[in-house]
Image (cartoon, grey):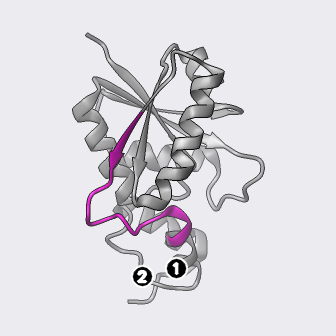
Amino acid sequence: MNRAAIYPGSFDPLTNGHLAIIQRGLNLFDRLVVAVANNPQKSPMFTVDERKALIREAVGNDPRVEVDSFDGLMVDYARTRGIPKVLRGLRAVSDFEYEFQLANMNKKLLPEFESVFVMTGEDYFFVSARLVREVAQFGGNVEGLVPANVLEALQRKLGRPPRS
């Protein structure tokens, strides 16, 4: 059986929490498409291509993980790919309300669409890409919150190593 799901997100930047969700997703699905959203309403730190490259490097050569990107509605991307399942990570109760609304809207737009939620591990429930970006921009140390390759990319992008 070839069970696949899409794990969409901005991944700006990829965090260890995202990697934990990918690993948990691989326990549930045979294949994951990590889909980087190109949201013109956001001002990302990394380009879509940079984010895709960082994800590819962080997940290594795992043949079960494909890295892609999309514009527009996730359900349209899911329909195009023929993968009507989405994997979403929940960090806290506050994530649930938004994800619940999103899941129901997606189901309304694509009736065969299914959302699968997994909790992030206790080590990363407080980590968000937005918070990592903010801490890094102010020179804070985000080591241990992001993969090593992402830490290096953040340091290059910001032109300085973070404070210890």
Asked which secondary structure carries label 1, the reply is: helix
Residue depicted at x 73% and y 59%: 43
- Counting from the top left corner in percent of width and height, residue 110 is at 60, 19
Placement of 79 over or under 69, stated as above or below? above
The reply to whether callout 2 and callout 1 are in contact (CB within 8 Å) is: yes
Q: Which residue is mark 2?
A: 141
Q: Which residue is mark 1?
A: 135
Region in magenta: 116-131
Q: Can residue 68 be seen in the rendering of this structure? A: yes
Placement of 69 over or under 76, stated as above or below? below
Q: Crowding near pointer 2: few (<14 within 10 Å), some, many (20+)?
A: some
Placement of 34 over or under 44, stated as above or below? above
Judge whether residue 13 is colored magenta.
Answer: no
- Counting from the top left corner in percent of width and height, residue 147 is at 35, 60
Quadrant, the C terminus:
bottom left
Quadrant, the N terminus:
top left
Residue lying furthest top: 1
Residue depicted at x 30% and y 51%: 20
Q: Amino acid at mark 1?
A: Val
- Counting from the top left corner in percent of width and height, residue 162 is at 46, 83
Q: Amino acid at mark 2?
A: Asn
Residue depicted at x 60% and y 44%: 49
Which of 147/100 is in front?
A: 100
